[in-house]
Image (cartoon, helix red, strand yellow):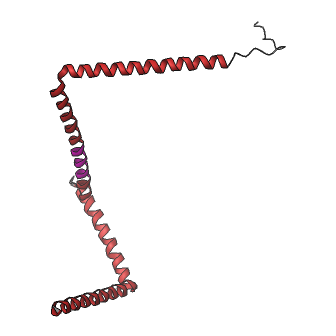
Amino acid sequence: MTDSTNDEGLKDRIQRSGEEAIGKVLGDLLENPLFTGALGRALEARERANQAQEAALGALNLPTAADLSRLTRRVRSVGQRLEGVEDALDRLEGVLSTDGLGGIEERLSSLENAVSKASSSASSKAKSAAGVKSKAAPKRKPAAGKAKPKAK
């Protein structure tokens, strides 16, 4: 039992010291201006190579990795939309199988009745509100002493 505990302790110490050594080496490298300059130039060269590759693929009318990624996202989006359409069709199929066309016609007529009641209620409220507004705001009379000019 103590051997396994010692082994785990030794393993942790070695791992910790290895991590510290790697961190120190990386810190020293990043502080070195020659290394950071070389790293910057390498990254710039990589970017130029990527641009040249995209230009060459474009000249050959071949898709780039970015084009394929964009296409993959669009295909996933279309797939999700298609699943939504399938779900809606399943619901519609369930309604048709339980109610039949007669049930759907009844639902439509009840919806039409509800809409017509709501619109007639709204229009009567609008008319009554307009009547109240017209009574509350009487027409202005022209000011006395100002005559309208006569047409020649």
Vertical side of 90 occupied by 107: above or below: above
Taking depth in this image into account, of 65 and 23 the one nearest to the observer is: 23
Residues rendered magenta in the picture: 70-80
Q: Position of residue 131 (x, y in %)?
A: 59, 16
Residue 4 lies within the magenta run: no
Q: Is residue 142 left or right of residue 133?
A: right
64 sits to left or right of 141: left
Question: What's the residue at 17%, 31% (across, down)?
Answer: 93
Count the marks: 0
Question: For residue 130, which quarter of the picture?
Answer: top right
Q: Which residue appears at 52% of the width and 20% of the height?
A: 126
Viewer-side residue, 152 vs 86: 86
In the picture as drawn, the residue positioned furthest to the right comes out as 145
Quadrant of the drawing holding the N terminus: bottom left
The front one of 5 and 104 is 5
**Residue 77 included in the magenta stretch of the image:** yes
Q: Residue at x 27, y 57 (%)?
A: 66
Is residue 77 or residue 120 the one in the foreground?
Answer: 120
Q: Position of residue 64 (x, y in %)?
A: 24, 57
Picture layout, residue 46 above or below residue 11: above
Q: Quadrant of the C terminus?
A: top right
In the image, residue 98 lies at what x, y percent?
16, 27
Judged by its main secondary structure, the magenta piece is helix
Give residue 42's quadrant in the image. bottom left
Residue positioned most to the top: 152
For the point 27% across and 22% down, the residue is 107
Percent x, y of residue 95: 20, 29
